[in-house]
């Protein structure tokens, strides 16, 4: 009986050792983080001098996509968070800095601020991201999707009904070679660049405010 018990104990120890050795021998899945980036805009030339100060308000991201982990759409109503791939920082602050930096390079405004500045802004830009997702519903046709609503406000004093100069809703779907994080981020970069380029015409026009005695909407 003692011999059998010793054998069972030895076999149990050997099995546990094998399990732990196998686990330690497998490479751990690495968490990877990424940051979005866009190329600088084309410089203005021979146009009107820059306007006042633009305040890019903090970008708001829809709750379903306001996550550092990449959000993946697998079916019509199925979304999952990727536990191994995500953004270096939360998408809202990251997009705020990207949008502000890009508009500053456009040279439409004398300066662009994102908050905390003592300079009083003359214009404000609101951006709401309604989609920021990896669309993997069709395995053979993955895509990066970015959609947002942008609003330019001016002047910042007076009735709110007279502050809205324009509002644009833009959505870009960029096909990517495969469902992989590097390709996905590259697709989002293209989408963001195209959206900003589409807004550049509106930002350069900067229509004047309505007369102060204009009737409220």
Image: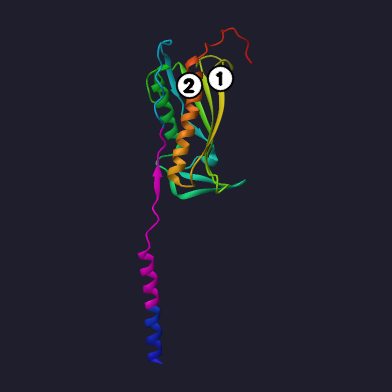
Give the total of numbered labels. Answer: 2
Q: Position of residue 175 (x, y in %)?
A: 52, 39
Q: Nearer the viewer, residue 103 or 52?
A: 103
Picture disc at residue 181: none
Magenta range is 14-37
30 relative position to 165: left or right: left
Q: CA distance from mark 1 to mark 2?
A: 13 Å
Q: Nearer the viewer, residue 101 or 174?
A: 174
Classify mark 2: helix, strand or loop: helix
| Res 114 visible | no
Q: Please rate how many residues cluster around mark 2, counting C-alpha atoms within 10 Å: few if below 14, some from 14 to 19, many from 20.
A: some
Q: Position of residue 159 (x, y in %)?
A: 56, 15
52 relative position to 131: left or right: left
Residue displayed at 49% across by 33% down:
191
Q: Nearer the viewer, residue 116 or 139?
A: 139
| Res 160 visible | yes
- The residue singled out by tag 2 in the image is 200
Check the image and report above or below for 5 versus 83: below
Q: Position of residue 99 (x, y in %)?
A: 44, 28
Picture disc at residue 166: 1
Residue displayed at 48% across by 49% down:
82
């Amino acid at each position: 009986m003692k011999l059998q018990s010793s054998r069972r104990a030895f076999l149990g120890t050997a099995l546990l050792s094998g399990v732990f050795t196998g686990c330690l021998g497998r490479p751990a899945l690495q968490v990877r983080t990424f940051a979005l980036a866009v190329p600088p805009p084309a410089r203005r030339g021979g146009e009107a001098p820059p306007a006042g100060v633009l305040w890019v308000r903090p970008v708001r991201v829809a709750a379903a996509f306001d996550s550092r982990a990449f959000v993946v759409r697998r079916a019509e109503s199925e979304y999952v968070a990727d536990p191994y791939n995500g953004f270096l920082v939360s998408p809202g602050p990251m997009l705020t800095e990207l949008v502000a930096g890009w508009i500053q390079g456009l040279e439409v405004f004398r300066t662009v601020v994102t908050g905390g500045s003592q300079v009083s802004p003359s214009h404000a830009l609101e951006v709401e991201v309604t989609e920021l997702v990896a669309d993997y519903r069709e395995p053979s046709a993955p895509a990066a999707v970015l959609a947002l609503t942008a609003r330019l406000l001016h002047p910042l004093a007076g009735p709110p009904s007279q502050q809205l100069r324009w509002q644009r809703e833009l959505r870009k779907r960029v096909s990517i070679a495969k469902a992989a994080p590097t390709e996905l981020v590259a697709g989002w970069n293209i989408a963001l660049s195209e959206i900003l380029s589409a807004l550049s015409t509106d930002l350069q026009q900067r229509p004047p405010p309505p007369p102060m005695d204009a009737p409220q909407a």
